[in-house]
């Protein structure tokens, strides 16, 4: 009733949720602020109060996704086998949430252009993901758990690419693609020890 | 001058080229027929004469891309090592043509939804690509050229996914991704013989 802080925060979260749905359906460029406001049951002016620009709203969507992933999978563990297991758990989570995967795939494909407001996010996202996997594979190489001949940089690039490419194929032909299973199979070929204890 | 057949065909090709550029920049949903007509230097009514619907124009763009790929790489060779080499040649070609890769990645990500006019194209495209790679890996298994333990179905799925995922990462951070090199490295791990003669 008062428009105070808790209500404002709820409105903000509602808008981020509505934006994630609209971006997933129509892409970032195809998703208008008017449509997002309508879905959230808020006036266009009300939306602009919380997010003055399309870019600010997109940044909030991406930040929330990362925060949720990090919370759920506790992605901050030190480099090693456990990091790879957490990526698999994330893939299993994604396989139960096609809407999130759809949003991510569409934005990643749109944001390849340097001018796109999510471009720097995805540059950083890919670089961070590659480095986390590479550092983990290096640790495994030191303990003899990496298959001889596997290059940590090349394998990290392939792992992240495989994750992305599988998502699009899985969304297109869900009954023919085992999202987490294919990733698990690939990871296991890199190791001399069982991935799962 | 007369609006006869050769001129009509040139106009049609111009429109397909303009559509490929606009879809690559703004996605299919974000690219309007008006913008495409403007790029091709043709009136909106002139565009509608050649392509009465957005869907018809998109189908023409995808068909031309497939025809060009098939012509250039002679993709119709029998299953075997040569098929895998042709996929690599295609990746090398793509690495010189980021605009084509951008268009493909955006449309693939947009078209995961069953209602999208390119959805059936991508279902068929992925299925065909997986089957061609799988059949080739089966031939190599028969001749002892496939590494023991490699499953042709799983490896084919991973290969096509890797190709797609690498494209998006390469477009995002071009200086950090060797598109064809990463694919070549992965293919070589599947084989007991050198991929290149």
Image: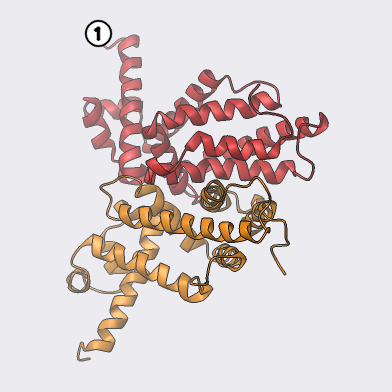
Chain colours: A red, B orange
In the image, B192 versus A178, the foreground residue is B192
| Residue A44 in view in this figure | no
Q: Position of residue A194 (x, y in %)?
A: 68, 28
Q: Residue at x 52, y 61 (%)?
A: B98
In the image, B188 versus B58, the foreground residue is B188
Q: Residue at x 70, y 66 (%)?
A: B196
Q: Position of residue A24 (x, y in %)?
A: 35, 38
On screen, A34 above or below B37?
Answer: above
In the image, B52 versus B149, the foreground residue is B149
Q: Residue at x 52, y 53 (%)?
A: B160
Instruction: Assign a secondary structure to mark 1.
Output: loop
Q: Is residue B181 left or right of residue B113?
A: right
Outermost residue, bottom side? B2
Q: Is residue B116 left or right of residue A152?
A: left
State which quadrant residue B120 falls in: bottom left
On screen, A14 above or below A146?
Answer: above
Q: Quadrant of the N terminus of chain B?
A: bottom left
State which quadrant residue B83 falls in: bottom right
Q: Residues within 10 Å of mark 1 (few under 14, many from 20)?
A: few
Q: Position of residue A115 (x, y in %)?
A: 48, 49
Q: Quadrant of the C terminus of chain B?
A: bottom right
| Residue A1 in view in this figure | yes
Q: Is residue A54 left or right of residue A37?
A: right
Q: Residue at x 29, y 82 (%)?
A: B9
Q: Position of residue A118 (x, y in %)?
A: 47, 41
Give the residue number, with chain letter if any, for mark 1.
A2
Q: Is residue B14 left or right of residue A104?
A: left
State which quadrant residue A16 falls in: top left
On screen, A20 above or below B69?
Answer: above
């Amino acid at each position: 009733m008062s428009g105070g802080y808790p209500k404002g925060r709820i409105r903000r979260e509602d808008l981020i949720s509505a934006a994630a749905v609209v971006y997933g359906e129509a892409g970032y460029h195809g998703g208008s602020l008017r449509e997002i406001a309508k879905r959230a049951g808020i006036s266009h002016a009300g939306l602009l109060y919380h997010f003055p620009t399309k870019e600010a709203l997109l940044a909030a969507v991406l930040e929330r996704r990362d925060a949720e992933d990090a919370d759920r999978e506790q992605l901050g563990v030190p480099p090693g086998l456990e990091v790879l297991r957490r990526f698999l758990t994330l893939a299993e989570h994604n396989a139960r949430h096609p809407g999130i995967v759809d949003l991510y795939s569409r934005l990643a494909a749109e944001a390849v252009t340097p001018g796109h407001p999510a471009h720097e996010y995805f540059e950083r996202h890919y670089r961070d993901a590659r480095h986390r996997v590479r550092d983990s594979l290096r640790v495994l190489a030191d303990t003899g758990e990496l298959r001889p001949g596997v290059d940590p940089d090349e394998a990290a690039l392939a792992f992240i690419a495989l994750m992305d490419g599988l998502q699009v194929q899985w969304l297109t032909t869900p009954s023919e693609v085992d999202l987490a299973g294919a990733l698990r199979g690939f990871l296991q070929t890199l190791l001399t020890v069982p991935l799962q204890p």
